[in-house]
Amino acid sequence: MKNKIVLSLITVVPFVIGGCATNAHYVQTGDKEQIVSVGQINIQDYDNAANAAIKDMLDSSALSEALGHISNPPAVLAISLIRNNTGQQIDMNLLTKKIRIALNNSGKFVTTTTVGLGGKVEDPLAQGIQQKNEFMNDQQTTRSPDFSLSGNIIQTIDRSGDTRRSTYSFQLTLTDKQGLAVWEGEKEIGKQGTRPAVGF
Amino acid sequence: MKMRILLPLGFAAGLIVLSGCTTVNSVENADKEGQRNMVADTRAVTDSSLNRKVNIVGVNTSMTPGGLLKVQVELQNRTRSLQRFLYHFEWFDANGMQVNNVLSASVPDQIEGQESKFIFGIAPNPNCKDFRVKFIEAN
């Protein structure tokens, strides 16, 4: 009888130990294994918000008309303030970079890295080179932005019993040189889940 | 005794089945003004389960005001319950080469029971001439 128990334990132990090993593997962003968190913005949420904004921008008649008035295309885009009205820290590049890349790839926009909000530029070295060239050639080469991209990310939380729902609103606005919003878009991403019975 | 056990069980099972079903009623104009430019499509079905549930009705294309190819796919949920799926568009140039797209990740979407809905994609640049849409059943 004892032998049977020992034999069973010997058989089971490797499986238990094997179960402790981590199964690390590469995943693709937005695949079906994606992790969805109710209380925070997941990487695929930025993708979806950017995707919706880009599709909306590229399909906009008003924006297409505004682009038609640009004397020397492609239009220059500057990234302005995108307010974070959520409870978490967000690197806005997760949202804006995808939009910038897509707009750049479309051939309709280029983004300036030497004009920034409050004088804070993205690429100080490029700004230095540009300023030096302007000084040496005694002429202004800086092209002022034709459009600026601004927006808000807002989180609203609803609770009912153990059920919790977070809605993240990604609001973006493209403003032209005259201060007119030529395109505005909003994508809402809602996530719902129940609070675990054990935990904080 | 048997009835006492079976009746509540049957009632509970019925409730579960009924709560899982949400279908959509819709209305639209009968005489259509717009003409859809339907395109002939080639389909590769490897997940017959998803295909049975969410069926591709048709594909039509147009151009955006900026001259980019816009593709619209009509889907229909053939079941009576909500279905979740992921889709993503791939784009190809005139030489059949895939065009790099920053938004290559799949888009999660859902469709109510018996609902018919449209999804659309816009080509990342004017060089894109062809497309492919992939669908995956979500977990």
Image: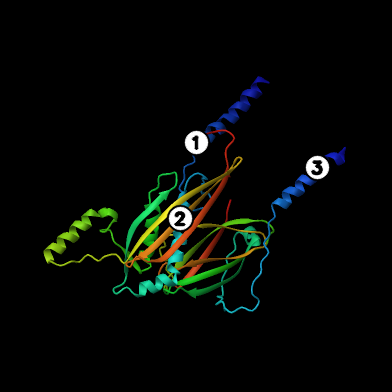
- Residue sitting at x 65%, y 20%: A2
Which amino acid does the dot numbered 1 rest on?
Ala
Residue B52 seen anywhere in this rendered image of the structure: yes
Of all chains, the one bearing label 2 is A
The alpha-carbon separation of the residues under discs 1 and 2 comes to 39 Å
Q: A30 or A162: nearer the eye?
A: A162
Whether tag 3 and tag 1 are in contact, CB under 8 A, the answer is: no
Of all chains, the one bearing label 3 is B
Residue at numbered disc 3: B8
Q: Position of residue A145 (x, y in %)?
A: 29, 64
Which amino acid does the dot numbered 2 rest on?
Phe
Q: Secondary structure at mark 3?
A: helix
Q: Which numbered marker is on residue A170?
A: 2
Badge 1: how crowded within 10 Å, few (<14), some, or many (20+)?
Answer: few
Q: Which circle, 1 or 2, is nearer the viewer?
A: 2
- Residue sitting at x 83%, y 43%: B7
Which numbered disc flags the more N-terminal residue, 1 or 2?
Answer: 1
Q: In the rendered image of this protein, does residue A90 appear above or below residue A197? A: below
Q: Secondary structure at mark 1?
A: loop
- Residue sitting at x 60%, y 65%: B117
Query: Which quadrant is the N terminus of chain A positioned in?
Result: top right
Q: Position of residue B67 (x, y in %)?
A: 42, 75
Q: Position of residue B94 (x, y in %)?
A: 42, 74
Which residue is at the far top?
A: A2
- Residue sitting at x 40%, y 61%: A173
Q: Which image quadrant is residue A95 in?
A: bottom left
Q: Which image quadrant is residue B101 in?
A: bottom left
Left or right relative to B121: residue A8: right
Residue at numbered disc 1: A21
Which amino acid does the dot numbered 3 rest on?
Pro
Q: Which circle, 3 or 1, is nearer the viewer?
A: 3
The alpha-carbon separation of the residues under discs 3 and 1 comes to 45 Å
